[in-house]
Image: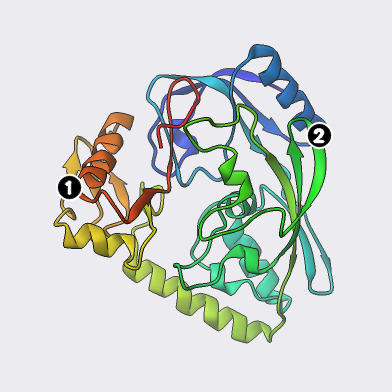
């Protein structure tokens, strides 16, 4: 495992905001994961797992942590059961499986990696389908030990999971679980039918959501109304701070105008929280310079 120092994180996130990681490594094997866990423990610094870089914003200074990315992206299929390594790009996986008559189309349009989707229980809206619908088990490193967790042990809820729980403030785990792979059981259908559904859902996403310099949905709703509707009704759609503004296309997306900072994004989120004290929770990870989470 090659641990690099002072590595820029800005280009590793879809929001294109952030400073440098004090330490950074791509993890190719399970042995690399073991070494990374030991390194972070020896240095007494947080270990931060980064997937495709969506849903995460880093502070602008030096992040005193070991930031890692899983690099393994293999796929093994047995009938309608598929084991996928965490670094596999989710949109690419959906299209590859469709050609073989395996239907993961409800997750169309969700950016990032399979590992990130498993971590955050990615899906389509509170009444939609989430990745936990397909999960059989997850291969994960927990506090330096490898285990295979069942779907029930993952404790999936709306945009939440046991994995995500371990990284939440106020007392985040300095060594959160590291997802290596997931085994899915998928419904079967005619490839042309799946492809048609993918194109339909993708067009819906393109028509209703921005896809440039954004980190995805910023908030999740914890009540009856969607987050974008609460923001709209509060008259906050035009909220801006420095180089960050709320998308005109979808009020639950933050946009980087070009040279945005961590502080800019933080101020927009805090403005929304102050004006909508109930019904919303921040879904994005805002990583502070000490490696812990602001949100």
* Badge 2 density bin: few <14, some 14–19, many ≥20, Cα 10 Å: few
Q: Residue drawn 58% across and 54% down? A: 117
- Residue at the spot of label 1: 239
Front residue of 34 and 208: 34
Q: Secondary structure at mark 2?
A: strand
Front residue of 254 and 231: 231
> Disc number at residue 94?
none
Q: Secondary structure at mark 1?
A: loop
In this rendering, would 54 be left or right of 227?
A: right
Residue 11 placement (x, y as % from top left): 46, 35
Find residue 251 and report its image quarter.
bottom left
Residue 194 placement (x, y as % from top left): 61, 81
Q: Residue drawn 81% across and 49% down? A: 148
Q: Quadrant where the C terminus lies?
A: top left
In this rendering, would 65 be left or right of 151?
A: left
- Residue at the spot of label 2: 145
Find residue 95 and report its image quarter.
bottom right
Front residue of 41 and 273: 273
Disc 1 or 2, which lies upstream in sequence? Answer: 2
Which of pointers 1 and 2 indicates the residue nearer the eye?
2
Q: Furthest residue to the top? A: 43
């Amino acid at each position: 495992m090659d641990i690099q120092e002072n590595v820029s994180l800005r280009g590793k996130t879809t929001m294109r905001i952030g400073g440098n990681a004090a330490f950074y490594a791509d993890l190719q094997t399970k042995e690399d994961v073991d070494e990374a866990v030991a390194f972070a423990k020896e240095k007494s610094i947080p270990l931060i797992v980064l997937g495709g870089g969506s849903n995460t914003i880093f502070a602008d200074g030096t992040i005193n942590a070991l930031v890692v990315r899983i690099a393994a992206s293999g796929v093994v299929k047995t009938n309608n059961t598929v084991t996928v390594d965490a670094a596999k790009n989710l949109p690419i996986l959906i299209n590859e499986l469709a050609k073989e008559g395996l239907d993961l189309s409800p997750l169309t349009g969700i950016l990032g990696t399979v590992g990130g989707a498993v971590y955050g229980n990615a899906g389509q809206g509170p009444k939609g389908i989430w990745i936990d619908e397909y999960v059989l088990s997850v291969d994960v490193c927990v506090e330096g030990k490898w285990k295979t967790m069942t779907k029930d042990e993952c404790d999936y809820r709306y945009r939440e999971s046991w994995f995500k729980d371990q990284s939440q403030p106020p007392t985040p785990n300095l060594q959160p679980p590291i997802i290596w792979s997931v085994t899915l059981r998928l419904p079967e259908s005619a490839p042309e039918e799946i492809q048609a559904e993918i194109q339909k859902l993708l067009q819906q996403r393109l028509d209703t959501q921005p896809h440039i310099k954004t980190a995805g949905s910023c908030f999740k709703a914890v009540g009856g109304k969607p987050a974008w509707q609460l923001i709209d009704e509060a008259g906050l759609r035009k909220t801006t701070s420095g180089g960050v503004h709320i998308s005109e296309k979808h009020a639950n997306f933050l946009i980087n105008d070009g040279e945005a900072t961590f502080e800019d994004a933080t101020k927009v989120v805090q403005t929304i929280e102050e004006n909508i004290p109930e019904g919303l929770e921040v879904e994005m990870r805002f990583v502070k310079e000490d490696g812990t989470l602001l949100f």
